[in-house]
Image (cartoon, grey):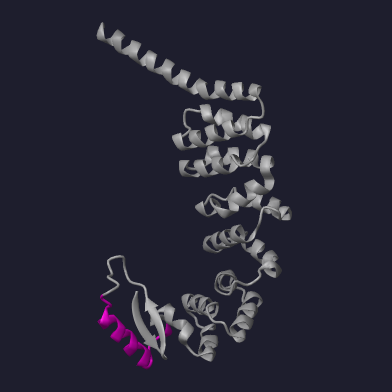
Amino acid sequence: HVPAFVNSSEICIEMGSGYTHNVPDLDLCAALLMLLSSEDVPIEMYPSTLYMFFPFKELQGMLSDKNENVVKNTLTAMGQLECAPSLRQLKKALYQTPNEAFVMTALEALFYGRDFNMKPYMPLLVELTNSKQKECKVSAIQMLGLILESTQKEYMHILRRLIRFEHHCVLGPLLDTYILMAREEALPDCLYLLENRKSYWHPEIVRRLCEIDHPLIKQALSVRYLAASTSAEERELIECYLNANCKDSTEKKVNDFILSSLESTNSDSDDKEGFSGLGSLFG
């Protein structure tokens, strides 16, 4: 980060990965200060990290700028201010603009910037998960996953719909909350994701399923354990799950049989390959 001072307040400009913290770019700092003192410089030329240092009245005027990025960055800056007027302005922005992207940015400023209680705005956030603007939809899904808890089962039907959205934003808090919320009822959806999503999804889905002790989950994970496409990471998770949830000696024997079946299958496969090799050797 490059330090600079604006109105006696220190700010930092993020640099690339090759930047050395002990050697600040003084030329950049000087250029930044010259920019602030210049006249007739378009607002979109200013680094958005400076917005929060502008007078509040100037920030309010920037909300009507024709440049969409300026408006978004202004709303984000208002989320970094602690004054009551900025909070009121963000609340107004939720209902006074027809632009879904601006509404979503205002919600993010309230939640991430002001740590605001989002309960009154949950209907609006859920509505934004239906947005046709992909960026807006993704942001709404990510925020919803961070806000909801597994005890709020009134949202289960909404989460069931959202986890079918093919985007990595689903993988994480949203999917975790849904599986813990729906428990064994989430199994059909998890099986769908295991069949239709990329392999990097699979360990996380299996990991969450392993937190639920239910016969159907055990059955599904046992089959998953024996599948040829299952990764070593998944098998390790399933093996720990099956061993940890044995309730009696009979169940222990069943688990041992399942876990040993894979070894037997691999052994048989190796024998066949060896025999095939000898056959080819002798023509």
The residue positioned 51% from the left and 21% from the top of the image is: 260
The residue positioned 62% from the left and 63% from the top of the image is: 128
Q: Is residue 28 part of the magenta span, yes or no? A: yes
**Span highlighted in magenta in the image:** 23-43
Q: Is residue 84 part of the magenta span, yes or no? A: no
Of residues 87 and 7, the one nearer the viewer is 7
Q: Position of residue 28 (x, y in %)?
A: 29, 81
The residue positioned 66% from the left and 63% from the top of the image is: 127
Q: Quadrant of residue 7?
A: bottom left
**Image quadrant containing the N terminus:** bottom left
Of residues 163 and 207, the one nearer the viewer is 207
Q: Position of residue 49 (x, y in %)?
A: 43, 78
Q: Position of residue 212 (x, y in %)?
A: 64, 40
**Image quadrant containing the C terminus:** top left
Q: Quadrant of residue 184?
A: top right
> Magenta segment, principal secondary structure?
helix
